[in-house]
Each structure stands twice: as structure tokens, then as C-alpha cells.
Image (cartoon, grey):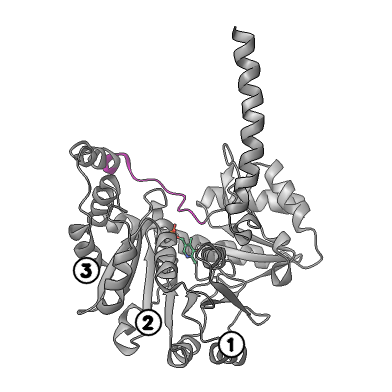
Amino acid sequence: MEINLVSFCEISRGESNILNRRRAQLIRPEIQALSAYHVPDADDFIKLDAMENPYSLPDELVRQWLAVLASVPLNRYPDPGAKQLRNRIRDYMEVPPGYEIILGNGSDELIQIIAMSVARAGQKIMAPDPGFVMYKMIATFVGMDYVGVSLKDDFSLDMPAMLEAIQKQQPAVIFLAFPNNPTGNLFAENDIVEILNAAEGLVVVDEAYHPFACTSFMNRLNDFDNLLVMRTVSKMGLAGLRLGILAGSEILLNEFDKVRLPYNINVLTQASALFALEHAAEFETQAACIREQREWLFDQLSALSDLDVYPSAANFILVRLKNGGADRVFDGLKKAGVLIKNLNAVGGMLAECLRITVGTAEENKIFLKALKNVL
Ligand SMILES: *Cc1c(COP(=O)(O)O)cnc(C)c1O
């Protein structure tokens, strides 16, 4: 009997695989053509690949945080509008009076909410290239066209090309990461202003790296009615929470809020973020350490003749191997227990480029030593 059952299951699994391969044709061709967002296994590595804050919280703060979590009612749905947290964030991030914020499950979800809200056939999302990969991926998810406009060789905005593309394509949304990922530089503020003036659609200034950049468009919301400013708590040290923030005109945010799933910010995230904001000074101290380490690492890398090192206002540094060998260097570092991001396969302007997230002083020293060994 058992043997029969097993073989019956196998036959039936084989048949259902055939059926599902056929059903997979229901999936839109552009989705079938995607490869899933890949995150490498990082167990036991010194992890300098994902722009995470390398510091954890002091034990005493962890104890207090756990006490807060213990009192969170898990049996209840979260506050759907996360009102208390939103008010606290609005103060902390100095959102100008008269402007609203909505929260996302990471800023990735906010990009998705914006895209879903404007998606219709033929509408476009535009961003400079190379840029943050999720803009393009999410455009594809929602069936929009993506228009990438190449940056100049120094990764500054190619303004004639940007303005021409805006004029010609009339994008519904332009995303400008400020500073840009994976290049690390801040675009010239004048250029962004020019884009804001030229665009009839929405312009999202994505300030994911705000704690390391020390500049912002938040205080300019009043100057441009098409401006939205996006932030996240991920890069400041709470990547595990998944919390993004979108600030802008109430008229626009009310529309986006209709697309947001009602309980997208769970109770643990709401309570933890409130706790973190009460202890914001701790995160600001950590960001200051990272900025200091970034300068140290920049100087050290710049002294190596094999590398072009690009200026960064973020918590990572992009380098290019002048004489090639990025894959070999990446593999060598991995063998030495250090995981960074290899961008060589992206090609184009990122050929032979590696991106290193700034770690603790100790991690950065270990990385540098390993790098010198493999160069
Ligand atoms: C990391 C990153 C994000 C994603 O942030 P999450 O809040 O973790 O989803 C958004 N934009 C840019 C430019 C990033 O580098």
C-alpha cells in the first residue's frame, strides 16, 4: 500500500508540474524574464555588502527595548495609520508644517505604492543610471516602462540628457537617490532643482543615506509642489525593522494612502521605531562614527594605486579596479572572510567596480589588509 501511495504521489507531482509549467505562462513575460532579487548567504562573513550599520545597541538599551516589546499586544491589529509613530517621525525628521508623511514596509514598499498608484500602459518611471535597482524592478512589477538616463563619467547628472528625456518621455515619476546608490555621490542640488522645475510629474528625492549625507530636500517641500522626499530607518541602523517614510503634499499622499495595505507597519515595528526615536542620539553617534570611518577608509583606498576611488556622502564607497580584476579581488576577499558587493557583472559604467559598506574601525582594517593581500 505504502509503495503504491508513493508512486501515486510521484506520478501526480509529475503531472501537476507539467500543468503548472503551463500555468506559469499566465505570468507576464516581463516578470518571467526577471531574476529574483539575490541576497548572498553571509554567515560568518565580515559583512560589508549591504549598507547596514555595523553597530548594535548597548545592552542596557536592548533590555529596555525588550521590556517595551513585552507589553505590545500581539493579538491586536496594529494602528492602521500608525498615528503616534507618524507624529513622532514628523517631528524628528523636521517635516515642514502643512506636509504629511506615510509609512512603508521599508522604502521599497513606498516605491511600490507610488508606482502602483500611477501605473498605466505607456506611463514611465525615470531615474539616472547607474542607480538603485528597485526603481527599475518595481516599474516592471507594475507594468510601467523604465527610462534610465546615463550619468556622466564622474557620476554627476547629465543635465542636457535628463532635460531632453523629461521633455520627450514625460515620466510620471522621476526617482533621484540623494546620495546615489551604488555610486555614493550627491547630485548637484542645482541640477535637482532644475529637474524639479522641468518635470510635470512627480520627483522623489530618495534620501536613504540621509544620516551620512548631512544635506536634504526636506526643507524645500514648500518650494516645489511636485517634490516628495523619501527616507528610511534601514541605513541608520534598523534595517531589520523595515520602515520607510515618504513626505510630501497631503493631496498626493492621500492618494498613495489608498493603495497602502492597512496594516503594513506591524506592531513590533511601530513599538520598536518609537523606542529607537526616543534614543535617537545613540543612532546619531553611530552615524558620526561611520562618517568618520568613511573618511578614513576613503583616504586609505585612495592611497592604493590599483584603484579609482569615488567620493561618497553615504555609508559605502565605490571603487574601480583600474587594470581590471574585480571578480578576482571580490573572490579573494570572500576567501579571506570579507563580503563586499561586486558590481562588475552589471557592466557599463560599473564594469570592474566594487562597493564596500563602511564597517566598524576593526572591520575596515581587516578588509583593507585583506584587500592589499589580494591586489
Ligand atoms: C537601501 C536603499 C533603499 C531601500 O531602503 P529600505 O527602506 O530598506 O527598503 C531605498 N533607496 C535607496 C537609494 C537605497 O540604497
Badge 3 crowding class, 10 Å Cα cut-off, few under 14, some 14 to 19, many 20 or more, is: few
Q: Residues within 10 Å of mark 2 (few under 14, many from 20)?
A: many
Look at the picture and state if 35 lies above or below 210.
above
Q: Amino acid at mark 1?
A: Ala
Q: Does the magenta run of residues contain 54?
A: yes
Give the overall secondary structure of the magenta segment. loop
- Which is more foreground, mark 1 or mark 2? 1
Q: Is residue 293 left or right of residue 255?
A: right
Q: Is ligand 1 closer than 8 angstroms to the Cβ of mark 2?
A: no
Q: Which residue is mark 2?
A: 227
The label number, if any, that marks residue 165 in the structure image: 1
Q: Is residue 369 visible?
A: yes
Relative depth, front residue between 89 and 330: 89
Kind of residue at badge 3 = Asp
**Does the image show residue 94?**
no
Is mark 2 in CB contact (under 8 Å) with mark 3? no
Does the beta carbon at disc 3 come under 8 Å from ligand 1? no
Relative horizontal placement of residue 369, taking residue 322 as reference (left or right): left
- Callout 3: helix, strand or loop? helix
| Residues marked 1 and 2 touching at CB (< 8 Å) | no
Q: Position of residue 270 (x, y in %)?
A: 26, 51
Q: CA distance from mark 1 to mark 3?
A: 37 Å
Helix, strand or loop at label 1? It is helix
